[in-house]
Image (tube, grey):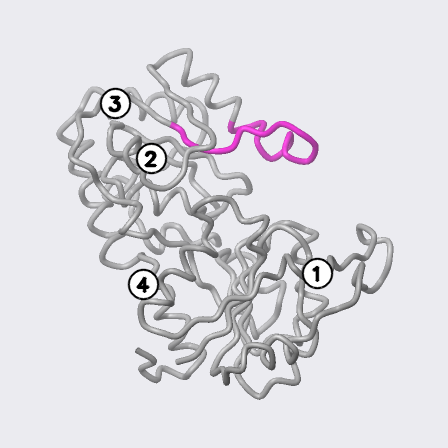
Amino acid sequence: MKILLLYNKKNAPPWNASILIEKELKKKHQVEFFDLGQTPYWTDFYGKLPFYFPKGFPVSVQSVIKKSGSKFDLVIIIDAPGQYRLTGLKKLNIPRVLWSFDTPEPDCFRFHNYFKNDYSHIFTVHKDLIHKFGSECKWLPGFCDPEIHKKYNLPKIYDIVFIGNLNLEGINAQLYSKRIELLKLLSEKFNLKVFSGIYGQEMARIYSQSKIVFNKSRRDDLNLRIFEAMACGSLLITDRPRPEVGLEEFFQDGKHLILYNNEKDLIEKVDYYLKHEKEREEIALAGYKEVLEKHTIEHRTTQMLKIVFNNIDTA
């Protein structure tokens, strides 16, 4: 299969999901990549206008295809920071997929929803938000990449670890304030190590060296950290999301991971599992096996292609 893959590579951080998906698709398919960051930014002046327009001369998908000299079977657009698009997508007579990771961001949703007729299929990693796009949207949850997120045979030198963003600037102040509050509480009672700006194999090695990995999602969501941490074989303790988020459709509390309900519950469970190594490692191992058996990037790309091509084998 020949795939045209579009995303904004310029703003994609290291080990971004877009980059991992590109790597995975190239194992079985011919993939040509076009960087949406090379096209003009589209704006509605932060919602002040009822329409979008490009801050420069727009680029059409037809011109990109013509320049490549290829005939494609599928176009996949993966959202990333920034509002970029190719015009002319809905004129193509091949499937056009939007794979959205940033649907919860109001600006991102507004932008994609305005142009949703560009796509024949829309996938979001957030189950509780599929209704916002309508019936054309499907749930495609997060994943791990076993080539990167893997269990290293290293001693457990950290009691509890968090790796992630603690940005308190602008809108992020509200998004991360609860996370920082919980980390401060944990640091007062346990040997907590916090890392930022760590990705890929380095992140996996730290997770593998941790007795417990702590998670507090930004928006009560099923974030990628859940899959990535479990794939490294350490016990994940994460906040209990609303049922409509879908986490408990995949993972069982007390069997694959540990869910906490509030600050008191978090402290009690961290204390318990630090003291009970056998139980901790049994749950960590069960979660590790479950993720690798059902929730890898290969599983997700296969699921996406089967939906788009009506369960036809696309390998």
Please name the amino acid that badge 1 sits on: Phe
Q: Nearer the viewer, mark 4 or mark 2?
A: 2
Which numbered disc flags the more N-terminal residue, 3 or 2?
2
Q: Secondary structure at mark 2?
A: helix
Q: Is residue 251 above or below residue 179?
A: below
Q: Which mark is residue 298?
A: 4
Q: Secondary structure at mark 4?
A: helix
Q: Which mark is residue 202?
A: 2
Q: Is residue 134 above or below residue 291?
A: below
Q: Which residue is mark 3?
A: 272
Marks 3 and 4, how far apart at CA? 35 Å
Q: Nearer the viewer, mark 1 or mark 2?
A: 2
Marks 1 and 2, how far apart at CA? 34 Å
Q: Which residue is mark 1?
A: 111
Marks 3 and 1, how far apart at CA? 45 Å
Q: Residue at x 73, y 60 (%)?
A: 40
Residue 163 position, x and y percent, is 41, 31
Which numbered disc flags the more N-terminal residue, 4 or 2?
2
Stretch of the chain drawn in magenta? 162-179
